[in-house]
Image (spheres, rainbow, N blue to C red):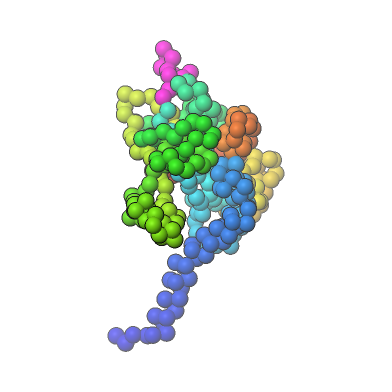
Amino acid sequence: AEFNFEVGQRIHERVSSYMGTPTILLLQLQRYRENGGFPSDLGASDRNAFFRLNDAFMETYPQFQSIYYGLEDGVFAGHGFSSKIANYREPGHSGYEIVMEDDGDAASGRAKDESMEKHYGACVNSTVGGEIPCLMNTGGKYTQCTAMAPSSSTGPLFEDGEEEAPPLFDCLLEKCTDEASQRDCDALTNNETEHSECLANIKWCSSYIIKEAFDNETLGFINRGTHCIDRTGVPSQTLGEVVQKDSVKLGNCYYKDGSTLVHRDRVGDFAYCGGNGKICNDTFVGAYESFDYDPRVREEMKM
């Protein structure tokens, strides 16, 4: 058969356009980030700022079913997988120990680490509402630090102890395994330019392993919530201001029974609130479903 060059050229253009769009989108996000659009550098407290920008991306690039990001501290935020919803996960490690009462009822259990108690009770019955324990199933995956960073706000986070940085992770940061990061920069001290370039090319990775929950363990997880959103893409449960699925009409946020209104106001010092012990009650606003999901594991576990 004779090759039609013009048809081939059109196919090449369409494929190039489709494959190139994610790069363009990332460059736009990077530029917005550099311009100070995310005061916390896309940390948890920047959730709503990202959702407003991402809503514009979702409208501009309808060919993508979902646009999202995940961080090495466990934060996950994005729109998609279903029409007109937002997904969000707080930072931190799942797999925290649950102390059960004598009756063995998960609802009466508590997190051994008191700081995780706010997460243990944050899951929700997606059918009729009501908070339920975030109890990990057997086989659930979670991250565990192999080396812990100092708990102080000013202590060094890097394995060589030569640099200091804000405690973005509780796992010690170590040099990644790529060739540039493993290069011995100390051997280049006689050449200041080459030495500086070597240091600039070092990438740091959070030191953790992925573990699996065994059937003799009782562990909790940090849930990824699915939220109703308003017309700006921000989680909402305000009556008359929620964008309806597969529509541009506004209405209310319901659980899956279609009649029970979502009203979430769990109080806690969540990272979304702003950190440093700040307390808020809108972290789970509009969240009608919970999943055991960690972007570092990339495996969703059903409750």
Q: Residue at x 46, y 39 (%)?
A: 157
Q: Is residue 282 left or right of residue 155?
A: right
Q: Residue furthest front?
A: 190
Q: Residue 197 appears at what percent x and percent y?
A: 43, 59
Q: How many numbered discs sit on the rendered protein?
A: 0
Whole-percent x, y for residue 152 in the image: 51, 31
Which of the 4 image quadrants contains residue 252? top right
Q: Nearer the viewer, residue 230 or 142?
A: 142
Tell me if residue 180 comes above or below residue 143 in the rendering.
below
Q: Nearer the viewer, residue 27 or 53?
A: 27
Work out which quarter of the rendered image holds the N terminus and state it: bottom left
The x and y percentages for residue 122 are 53, 30
Residue 223 seen in this snapshot = no
Side (left or right) of 239 relative to 179: right
Q: Residue at x 54, y 50 (%)?
A: 79
Vertical comparison of 180 with 140: above or below: below
Q: Residue furthest bottom?
A: 2
Q: Residue at x 42, y 47 (%)?
A: 204
Q: Residue at x 52, y 65 (%)?
A: 24
Q: Which residues are magenta?
A: 97-109
Taking 104 as reference, is 253 above or below it? below
Q: Residue furthest left?
A: 1
Quarter placement of the C terminus:
top left
